[in-house]
Structures are given as structure tokens and as C-alpha cells.
Image: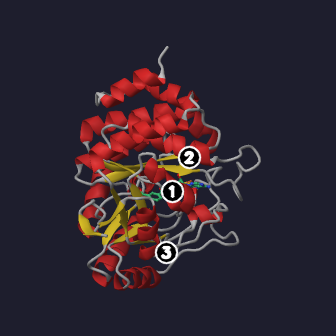
Amino acid sequence: MTSLETISAKVHAAQRISADEALFLFSSSDLLGIGELAALVNERKNGSRVFFNVNRHINPTNVCVNRCAFCAFSRTAGEEGAYTLALDEICRRAQEAEREGATEVHIVGGLHPDLAFEFYEETLRAIRNAAPKLHIKAFTAVEIEYFSRISGLTVEEVLKRLMAAGLGSMPGGGAEILVEDVRQKICPEKITGARWLEIIRLAHLTGLKTNATMLYGHVESAADRVAHMEMLRDLQDETGGFQAFIPLAFQTENSDLKLEVKGTSGLDDLKTLAIARIFLDNFDHIKAYWIMLGEKIAQVSLAFGVNDLDGTVVEEKIGHDAGARTPQSLTKDGIIRLIVKAGKVPVERDTLYHPIHSY
Ligand code: V47
Ligand code: SF4
């Protein structure tokens, strides 16, 4: 039987902790002890710097053939509230973002039954022309797999064509919980966890950096969370292509899972972020996505191993359609204030974590 002391000794000696030890941490109620270890790991990697970026999210369509049980964002084609943005509107939003100082657009959407693969290539090209300074972070592994299916191209061909059209990196969505029996409950239509990992492996090998997310606070167990993180740690050992790990706190309103699950508590949020920081020793960055966590927990998490607060976002649909009560957007000054008040040094970064400006 392990103990916090044993784990602490390992962390102090910069040794990797095991899955069993991570599971033990989930069962411990010593939040401050865990937080202290996470803060130590983060301090070694990032000092007192906390990253953020100035970005804008664009979701071209909410029409999706998958209709995952947890997702309050998606609609079936023709259903009330279903939308698909015109290319002009996507470009207008990207141009506006660039004008207002953004360095990144983050583009993800539903799996549309009628749009051809060429539409997505055209979207990237159009954004690149309209807002050439923006880095385009777009499409989850789930979308990439879908593009391969609708186009008849291999995943590698899809990735190369998207890169040629302007794709700069990929976000970490669609991972949910990679353990198969959890996926069967919350997103049975979605690609398997093994396939998600395979697409991400191919993306890394093709030269794209990606993030990795974990949707938590629904039907999964602590052991599922640890198994999820272990799969990511193993892949990171192999490719080194992950930039940040982003736990996404489940928003319960308006989703088909609403009645079955309660969502997360502040304590669970902080513990999960801290354990991720300790366990994922080969990830440089742990991101607190303030949209799902709330600004206050995101701020407090900076003392629990987190070193990235994501970005300004501007318009957020996925969490807000599911009842998130956070604002749709934070100003750059607002993010800087959160970080300074936490006693850290705010560093604006680009998508690939090159520092742009320290405050
Ligand atoms: O994959 C869907 C999640 C993800 C809900 O890589 C929900 O920088 C909570 O991946 N409650 C998309 N989460 C968002 C995402 C993301 C966000 C910010 C930064 C990055 C990055 C990636 O949102 C989906 C799904 O896991 N999601 N519904 C919900 N009700
Ligand atoms: Fe579609 Fe993604 Fe929502 Fe699942 S989570 S229904 S794949 S938009």
C-alpha cells in the first residue's frame, strides 16, 4: 500500500509515479498535500510563468451525425437551432479577431452529413487569405477521421492536404475518456479511444502538434481517469507531440446525461488538475480551461500545478449550450489580472508556446 509520503519522495526525486499511485491520490482527501506536489512539478518546468493566448473560437456548424449523449451543442440537420456558418462569416470573424490582436483561431464543429472534405480545405485557405497572421488550430481527431471517411482519402492524406491549406496544429477535443466502456455510455457513435490515439499519433508523425483533453465529472471512475491519462502519457513518450493537457469539467445542463450525473465540484477540479500535473511528467503544460471551470477555480488552480489559462475565446458555444455560467469571453487585461493576483507572471504566448510578451 502506497502513501502520500512515498509519492512525495518520488516526486521530490523527479521520478515518475505509477497508475496505482495516481489512483491513490484520487482517493486521498489531502488536497493541499497533492497541490503542493503539483506546484513543485510545475515550478520545475515553468517557474512562476503562466501562459495565456489571445484567440477566438469559431464553430462552423453544430450539425452532427454523432449526437453524443453528453453534448448539448450538436443538432440534427433541420432541427431547430441547427446552423452552418457561411464561409464569408467565418472569414469575417477571423479577420475581426486578427484586427483585435488575436494570434490564433480555434476551429471545431460537428460532423456535418452534407459538407464535402473540400469545404474544410477551402475554409482553411479562405482564413489564411483573410487573416494571414493567425495560426489556425483546427479539427479534433474525430473530425479528421470523419474527413477521411467522407473523402475516401487516408488519414495521412487528409492531414497533409489540410496542412497545405493552412492547418497549423490541432486542439485536443474528442478524447472524452479513452476507456471503451465509458465511451459506449456517453458517445457510442464516436470513434474508439484506440482510434483517437492512432489519429493523434499520425498527426504527430506528420508534424502537427496537438493538445489532449479529458472530459470528466460524468459516469467515469477515478480508475478511468487514470487509465485515460496513462494512454496519453504512453503516446507522449513515443511522439512528444502533445503540448498541453486540458481536463474539461463536465457541464450538465441541457445534455441527455443531465439527470444521471451531478458534474464536478471545485475540490474535484483542483485535485484532477493537480494529479494530472504530477502524473503527466512528460507534458510541459497543464491548461485550466476557465470557460468550464469558472474564473475563480481557474485562478486558484495556478497554485495547484496549472501553468496555462487558455485564451480570450470571444464566443464559446460548446460549454455554454451545456449551461456554463462563465462569460463568453475574457479580455486580455482580465486574464492578466487573474494571473497577477495569483502571484504569477503572465506571459502571452502563441499557439506553439513561443512567448510574445511578459507582463
Ligand atoms: O471534445 C462537450 C467537450 C470538447 C461538453 O485543445 C464538453 O486548446 C464540458 O476540446 N461539458 C471541445 N465539456 C472543446 C475542446 C477544447 C477546449 C478548449 C481548448 C482546447 C485546446 C480544446 O468539449 C469536446 C468535449 O470533450 N464538451 N460537451 C459539456 N457539456
Ligand atoms: Fe458531435 Fe462532437 Fe457533439 Fe459528439 S461532442 S455530438 S462528435 S459535436
Of all residues, the one furthest to the top in this rendering is 1
The amino acid sitting under disc 3 is Val
The amino acid sitting under disc 1 is Ala
Residue 189 in view (yes/no)? no
Q: Position of residue 148 (x, y in %)?
A: 38, 54
Image quarter (top left, top right, bottom left or bottom right) of the C terminus: bottom left
Q: Which mark is residue 269?
A: 2
The amino acid sitting under disc 2 is Asp
Position of residue 285 in the picture relative to residue 302 (left or right): left
Position of residue 290 in the picture relative to residue 232 (left or right): right
Q: Residue at x 47, y 54 (%)?
A: 288
CA separation, marks 2 and 1?
9 Å
> Looking at the image, in which quadrant does ligand 2 appear?
bottom right
Q: Residue at x 37, y 64 (%)?
A: 52
Q: Residues within 10 Å of mark 2 (few under 14, many from 20)?
A: many
CA separation, marks 1 and 3?
17 Å
Relative to 63, is 187 above or below?
above
**For residue 317, what is the image quadrant?**
bottom right
Q: Which mark is residue 195?
A: none
Instruction: Kindly identify which residue carries mark 1.
Output: 298
Q: Residues within 10 Å of mark 1 (few under 14, many from 20)?
A: many
Ranked by sequence position, the earlier of labels 1 and 3 is 1
Instruction: Kindly identify which residue carries mark 3.
Output: 314
Residue 342 in view (yes/no)? yes
